[in-house]
Image (cartoon, rainbow, N blue to C red):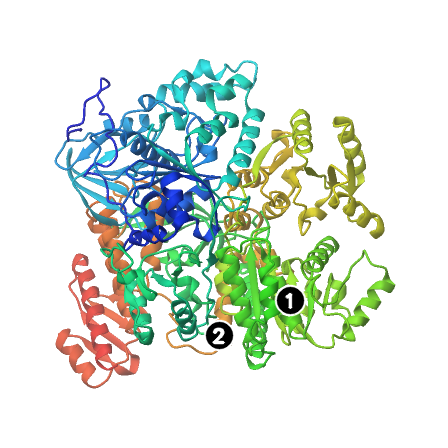
Amino acid sequence: MGGGGVAESSAGFVDWPTPGRATRAAVVRPAMSLRPLLAHLADSPDGVKLATEGGRAFVSQTMRPYLLAALLDGVDGALAAGRPAIVVAGDDRQARDLAVDLRTWLEPRPVRFYPSRGVTYESHLAPPPHLTGLRIAALDALVAADDPAADGEPPVIVVSAVALSEKIPDPALRPHGFTLKVGELLDLDEVSLELVAAGYERVDQVDDRGQFAIRGGILDVYPATEDRAIRVDLFDIEIESLRWFSTFTQRSLGEADSVEIAPAAELAAEHREAAEQAALLADDDERPDVSQLLPVDRFHAFLDLAPDDAAIVIAAEEEIEPALADHWQDVTAAFHDTDARDLYVNPDTITATLKARTSIALSSLDSGQEMEFRAQSAELAARSLKEAEPELEKLVRSGYRTFVAWPRRGEGERAAYNLARLKARWFGANDHIVSNKDPYAEPALNFAEATLRDGFIAAGLKLAILPEHRLFRRKRTERTGGQSVRQRRKGALRSFADLRTGDIIVHEDHGLARFAGFETKTVAGITRDYLELEFAGTDKVFMPVDQLAKISRYVGAGGSHPPLSKLGGKSWETMKSRARRAASELAGELINLYAERRRRVGHSFPEDSDWMRDFEGRFPHQETADQREAIDQVKVDMESARPMDRLVCGDVGYGKTEVALRAAFKAADDGKQVLVLAPTTILAQQHFGTFSERLKDYPFTIAHVSRFRTPQEQREAIGAFNDGKVDILIGTHRLLGKDMRPKDLGLLIVDEEQRFGVKQKELLRQLKLKVDVIAMSATPIPRTLQMSLAGLRDISVIETPPEGRRPVKTYVGEYDEPLLKQALEREKARGGQAFFLHNRVESIDETAERLRGLCPDMSFVVAHGQMEETVLEQRMLTFLRGEADVLVATSIIESGIDVPTANTLIVERADLFGLSQLYQIRGRVGRSRERAYAYLVYPSHASLTEDAMKRLTALSDYTELGSGFKIAMRDLELRGAGNLLGDEQSGHVAALGFELYMAMLDEAVAAAGPAVDGEDEGEPVRMDVNVDAYVPADYIPYEQAKIDTHRRIAGARDLADLGALHEELEDRFGPVPEPVDHLIQLQQARIKLGQAGVRAVSFKQDRLSVTPVDIEGSQVTALKEQLPGCLYEPGRSQLSVKVDKDPAKRFPAVVKAADVLLAVTRLGA
């Protein structure tokens, strides 16, 4: 290995060169650069002054990326010109997003994101390899910029305040990297050892940076510093080719001559191993200090490694100190003072360094800065290009140089054609704005091919930058109801999780069995792969892989599974018949409800009024893109004549309530009444408080009904609503009583709909026929069920966390009183509150007393659902007003309670909760900018069931924001799927498994709905063909990929899929061996025969029999010409072809018959 002028190290490896070599992969960039537009900043005296002299300035959030880029590059004589730049943001998410934006504006100048480690030093010695790669690439680019011989433009490094506080091992402490070149020799055993030493992980299939896989003569590596993985193809021990490939499709993307494999760890193996061993010591007193394990004297602050001439710019001054203080609090809680100083930089030192070296500091908080750069959000919210046209014209007539960024030029070309009157010009990559005489300096509409996350309209610069997605309000997609469920599922795995040996599976014909693995068997001289399935008793079935579509992984209504089925028994067929009848009834109800809603004409609400715009303008936060899209979708629904039925789904605290508030305002503003339904009293009370606060300045009357109100107060509120004196009524299921007769109901909002009982759901179902409906859910629904619902309900998903939201730090472990005492006291010390969840009413007071003894200086209040309403309300209000430090409660806090000052949660006996329930509970904290902590504790390892351990492990794994879908999918496996469909269906789900029952429901919905051309794919063609067809163990050595290959072949529904799979197999595993080729050819023949209407192929003595075959006239003639000696019997719809007695020659006969039959049937089409 080696070469390319790289110095050999003493260890026999080669040192990793600095970034920027020609051999590096070219990063995929936006279609063009918007960089010339940065010159517009020179039109602003303040802009020139800030760029050339430095200082502090206010900037609107939407304009921040543009201003930063222009300060670095857009003004002659700027302080940052020709120098490496460091841009400091608050946290990693803000830094990452800013790096993406700056890359778009500054292209082709290199912009790199330097993330924090992602883990603290005490939990892992090395950050995840994908973060390590980003860190190494950014740091080395920065250090290399100090070299006078460095080529290219100096880099821009975007770093978070948290990353600045982490000390960095000297680059000389890293393991060595190496270079791979076509034509050089490579020993796979040796390179495997070198990769592990460099911090790489060996896996079966490469998915992320820092991983590698070896299969036969192929090595896949995802270099830590690259954006793509590389596939190394060997001829014996010589590198024959290097190909970039996609880890998503596993397909090749292009050739390379050489590639550098950078280290995937910041410390050499000997340092990592010593620290890992020390971390395993149970006793803290035995554990040595960090200085004894690591060469901490060679750890440096990031800013100390930066070149002296680097320009430092602070992107958001207001975010730096809180981020540093919060992180330092975590550090001091985890480390002794000495260790903390050895591994981290304290906030005072960072602040002092930044103060001394920062040339420009921006802030979005107005604090009397001398210079300011204000801009509006780029929101036209038009419904069509026709509506956008006058808005764009108005901007141009007002003197704005207007630029619209289109991600795809084709869309922009169509828009330019439709806006011909405005004479839109295309702004090219080579255009430059050099003076006021430049055509782009004049007010006009310009188009550019580029991707922007956000835009702005700056009056001071007379500049409007509009991303295409900000031009239009998202249009509603009309549901035709005709898309095939099978088509929606096409290409997806049927099961929620990968099938593994030992899993319980469901066989459509035989019932529940245990998958014991693959076995390659030779029967009657023919070798095939079979799935070994174990049924009740000692019964076994070896199922051919071409029947793989008949099985699915078992996911039931509960965490356990029913007994394995007995082969030959009648009970399985009986259960299937019952379930099919139930699915048919449920499908009929769903279809009838959907058809009824489509037939009905609802109220069409008017477009937004001035009041509505005023109300939206008072929202104290910036909407996320997902939230804005959900709001727009709801408005479009409400303004159409068809009754709305939309599910707004998103993680806890992601802004679903604001979507509901906008809809409620729109309805009340039009004189319609609004009903808000919540499953619990506390949630109803919370909504009442939120709605009352947000709507207090508008003439709407709001009331609420719950256990906290007396019977008399409830009757009065309902009576006033019935008389039209109350505009918005909020409450629990009491609002579904017979005495509810709204005068003019226009909108129904249902929170956590899945938590209502069957009777309440039936009443809701009737209400939905008449009015617009929004349902909200904080427990995301699994994607498979989402697809099943997609034809019957519109869904908006909010996945983006609000600005400033941070992941909740989650601790899972045994009950430890000193730890919990420290957690509660730390929360009180920072002025916050805490939840302590104890879910047994009979012992909750005793628990509260125990806690009072543990923390005598703190105040505790107890709340649970069996209290009298007035007592419960008073105690909840005490906590909400901040008069108690800790709320000791049962799971009544699971939904709705919103206390921004409460940011520590302790859940006792967390092992007794379901995963989605724990996820909901954890969502009670972390709803502000403060770092939140969740402690999920259990008595001891001995008391944990295997499933409980899996649940808690999953929750600690998924701490990132927006993990809701992953949680829901995992919960579906661990807890079951019955509750998703309702109690009445859960028995059938338990008996048959979720997948098979959903398949039945899909079929029933298709049968009950309108017929759709091409909907019926029919049963797979039965083929009795004697040919070796299997996946050799030496070709695909690991079982997961083998299962996946068989599943994809058996599940393919068109020839293009199989062609692509053949190429992929060749790409990943090398030349496709004959038995695998036969598998693919068999499926190709099945597809062709199926398209010709054939259902069965068999051999009878020396003839091939194909049925049914329905052809006539010229088709029969063509058939006999192409298949000499064939016999066609129209009465029996059977084709018979003479074949050779040699079994080896029979398979080609089937392939030929399939080709001819397909061609002949198309001839008559």
Give residue 622's position: percent from left, percent from top: 54, 54
How far apart are the alpha carbons under marks 2 and 1? 37 Å
Quick check: can you spot residue 1025? no
Label 1 neighbour load within 10 Å: few <14, some 14-19, many 20+: many
Splitting the image into 4 quarters, where does residue 931 fall?
top right
* Placement of the C terminus among the 4 image quadrants: bottom left
Label 2 neighbour load within 10 Å: few <14, some 14-19, many 20+: some
Marks 2 and 1: which is nearer the front?
1
As rendered, which of 1102 and 299 lies closer to the eye? 299
Q: What secondary structure is found at the residue carrying circle 2?
A: helix
Quick check: can you spot residue 206? yes
Q: Which label sits on residue 1099? A: none
Q: What kind of residue is marked 1? A: Ala
Mark 2 = which residue? 1007
Give residue 644's position: percent from left, percent from top: 57, 72
Mark 1 = which residue? 664
Q: Residue at x 26, y 34 (%)?
A: 19
Splitting the image into 4 quarters, where does residue 600 fall?
bottom right
Q: Is residue 763 left or right of residue 976?
A: right
**Residue lying at the far right of the rendered structure:** 712
